[in-house]
Image (tube, helix red, strand yellow):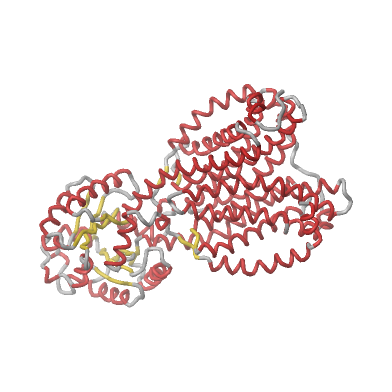
Amino acid sequence: MQKFGELICKNKRKILLIMLILLIPSIIGMKATRINYDILVYLPEDIETVEGQNILSEEFNMGAFSMILVEDMQTKDILKLEEKIKKVDNVQKVVSMADVLGTSIPTEMLPEEIQQKVYKDNTTIILVTYKEAISSDTTMQTVEQLRKITDEHCKISGMTATLLDTRELSNSEIAIYVVIAVILCLIVLEIVLDSYIAPIILLLNIGIAILYNMGTNIFLGEISYITKAISAVLQLGVTMDFAIFLYHSYQHELENVADANKAMSIAISKTFSSVFGSSLTTIAGFLALCSMNLTLGKDIGLVMAKGVLFGVISVVTILPSMILQFNGLIQKTKHKEILPKFNKIKEFNVKHYVVIVIIFVIILPIAFWGYKNTNVYYKLDSSLPDTLESISANNALKDKFGLVSQEMILINKDISNDNINKMTNEIEQLEGIDFVLSYSKLSQLGIPEQMIPQEIMQTFKSDNYQMILVNSKYEIATNELNSQIEKVNEIVKRYDKEAIVVGEGPLMKDLVQISDHDFNSVNTVSILIIFIIMAIVLKSISLPVILICVIEVAIFINMGIPYYTNLEIPFIASIVIGTIQLGATIDYAILITTKYIENRKQNMERKEAAKNALGTSINSIIVSGLCFFGATFGVGAYSKIEMIGSLCTLMSRGALISVVTVLMALPAFLILFDKIILKTTIGIKNK
């Protein structure tokens, strides 16, 4: 690696020129990468509800739909509005009771059961179906156009409208996330480094690595808005310590070597060997997310693993070139380090290691109980502000018409009307069912078949299926609705084994089940992968167990806090945060452990070895933890999208908890299990 370092130093200006040129395709790639705002598209393609959504699109040309609430408009004006809506590209059908009644039949002639669901307090509903899928760019553009066509008397509800608002809110916030993260990291770096200019250079280096990472996302096709929102700040947080290590190593070598290029080549060599091993566990933690059945994990995992790799490459190529180029300025702006040395902590920890172990054992069951019982929510729009137009429309639908959760039953078109009526009657008897509407039910409600327009008839029947609408009083993603959907499924399958219950409710039910499985599997996979890597790196069986246990307790504490503070967190945070925290902060524990082993190899007594390892590592760990905290804390506090805010809050808090746990508990456990460590670690003489 020494020759590699010399090569970098020799070609520093060429590297900086290449770096600038590569920024052009990176920025183009970043702009061209499609962003997906619908988490439900990450469900596996082979589950029944997703297949049902495909049938809706292919058989009924209903890729998605919206319900438009129209207030204080006469029937003739509603019909005119419908004509305007029909002219918009991607609109498939436009249906309302105005199509049935026309301008001559009063609303009062409708059966009361229908009146309550389509007309109330001078407000009626227009159903608009789209040809393309819920989250397609075309459908989102269509909803944008409909918002321009409709006026202040209209509100557009539905998943697409919610995704559109999510996009607008996310896009308005992302630049602010980066600014906040940079400012807080800059403050931390100005405190912990000995130069006013060095922090800016380190941040520029990480910024370039982030742009490369975001630009190469174009090869993935698309990424989720969650990945886009957190990847930059998370990459900043987990790779900054690589840059700090190189800078400190370079400054240390300058004390012994007069030539800056020579000092840097040695620093590159030392940094690469240390950072490579450290980055492996972080990359492994992120790649473990790819094991999730919900492919959002793969989305986040691949982008972040790639980001860490770019971070390592930039730290040993671009950063040395930048530091050497601006070396004079760095030296001129030197100042005394403000961060204290924390010498008293190492004395205290080693002296009271037994008490620390006892406290650790007492905290463990309390933290684990909170971790296992923290409440999570799955309803996607719960993470958005109520002031958004789509959320306001969804709430109005619920409050005024009782339209809380709508499902659709797709059943063979050849099933007789008698059987359909029997089935719908059974479903109507279920607790929490508001109404069931089928083609055959319209005539039962007193609407003659000749009054029903062909367009409405086509809404209920296709070449192979007939569709039945079901409205539930239960909220989406609740235990009550999930249980109700299971009962509806049981009834439907008795009449047609191939029938499918589709809609947001059934999709969310599958999301809940898949997420529960992923919660356990992804943590197991990440622990197993990181255990194997550490066993190879540390040449020990016992040390990986100790290190993982220490970080896992930090994760239990972090995830248990919402339970004891009575807070609900988004489901995706509960799945990924453990893996992210383990992969990103296990390096803190590895640093102390590596130095402890080296000290024991040099015949240092166990307490002295722990004290020395802690003393020489404490500042690096605190700096790394503070950078991780700074990069994510501000975003968590600022973001109005709770899905993103909660993730960043958990990451920032997790970084600090991991720092405290590693500094306090790990030395105590190294001392306590010293005999076992000596017997199960290759290369240490048995003391």
Q: Position of residue 68 (x, y in %)?
A: 31, 65
Q: Looking at the rendering, which quadrant does residue 134 occupy?
A: bottom left
Q: Position of residue 665 (x, y in %)?
A: 62, 30
Q: Looking at the rendering, which quadrant does residue 16 occupy?
A: bottom right
Report whether 581 appears left or right of 607. left
Q: Looking at the rendering, which quadrant does residue 120 occupy?
A: bottom left
- Residue drawn 60% across the image and 25% down it: 357
Q: Is residue 235 above or below residue 130?
A: above
Near-viewer residue (674 or 224): 674
Report whether 604 appears left or right of 415. right
Q: How many numbered circles are shown?
A: 0
Q: Is residue 262 above or below residue 54?
A: above
Near-viewer residue (654 or 287): 287
Return the residue found at the far right: 258
Which quarter of the rendered picture does the C terminus lie within? Answer: top right
Near-viewer residue (341 or 522): 522
Q: Position of residue 511 (x, y in %)?
A: 38, 50
- Residue drawn 15% across the image and 74% down it: 104
Q: Position of residue 641 (x, y in %)?
A: 48, 53
Report whether 265 appears left or right of 302. right
